[in-house]
Amino acid sequence: MKRFLLPLGLFLALVIFLGVGLKLDPREVPSPLINKPAPAFALPTLADGARTVRKEDMLGKVWMLNVWASWCVACRQEHPVLVDFARRQTVPIYGLNYKDERADGQRWLQEGGNPYVESLFDLDGRTGIDYGVYGVPETFIIDKAGVIRFKQIGPITPEVLEKKIEPLLRQLNG
């Protein structure tokens, strides 16, 4: 009888861990980059491969970095929300076109509207990796000093804008 207690105990521990894990929201995964300086980058723009944008170009302003791709289904759901939000000119939105073909990304913005001040072209995904991106879309809010203050995993919804992003932007710009 005693020889069954150890396997039974291990099984029950696994069931408890699984139960706790299933209740967690994968969009609430804390990023190790929150409250740390945003990784440096120097990337060509999607519109003009000869023009380069650097993280240092953003210093002194609060800005949003939205990681997207033309092949991303969730990005298509999020895109109208970003286009509408960009019209309000609350914060400059920069796109990071992630592991995409330049022509596909350009066509996608022409068809769906362009919410970005500039969209950066990250063909090999290295900058995305530096930011800890493991799926698109992901969005970051970066403060005037270049520090990441928020990360949204998955699409931005009107509710996320209203309850999380807009209050943070008021605080950072206030």
Image: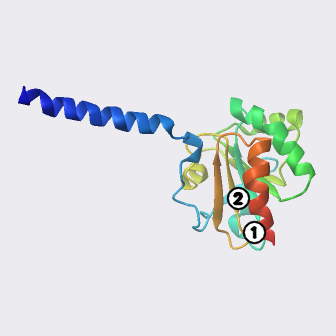
- Residue at position x 73%, y 36% from top? 75
Identify the residue at horizontal 80%, vertical 43% (top origin): 158
Which of the two residues, 76 or 100, is positioned nearer the viewer here?
76
Residue 9: mark: none
Residue 61: give x, y in percent of width and height. 79, 69
Residue drawn at x 17%, y 30% is 7
Q: Amino acid at mark 1?
A: Leu
Task: State left or right for residue 141 relative to residue 35.
Answer: right
Residue occupied by mark 1: 172
Q: Compare residues 74 and 40 and report the one nearer the observer.
A: 74
- Depth check, mark 1 against mark 2: the one in front is 1
- Horizontal relation, residue 113 to residue 79: left or right: right
Residue 44 visible, this angle: yes
Name which of mark 1 and mark 2 comes first in the sequence. Answer: 2
Q: Which residue is the site of mark 2?
A: 141
Quadrant where the C terminus is found in the figure = bottom right
In what element is the residue under mark 2? strand
Q: How far from the left and from the top, in percent, is residue 23?
A: 50, 37
Q: Residue furthest front?
A: 1
Q: Answer yes or no: do the residues labelled 1 and 2 have beta carbons within 8 Å?
A: yes
Q: CA distance from mark 1 to mark 2?
A: 10 Å
Looking at the image, is 85 positioned above or below residue 92?
above
**Towards the viewer: 86 or 68:** 86
SS state under label 1: helix
- Amino acid on which the number 2 mark rests in the picture: Ile
Depth check: give the residue in front, 144 or 21.
Answer: 21
Percent coordinates x, y for residue 146 in the rendering: 67, 69
Residue density around tag 2, few if under 14, some if 14–19, many if 20 or more, within 10 Å: many
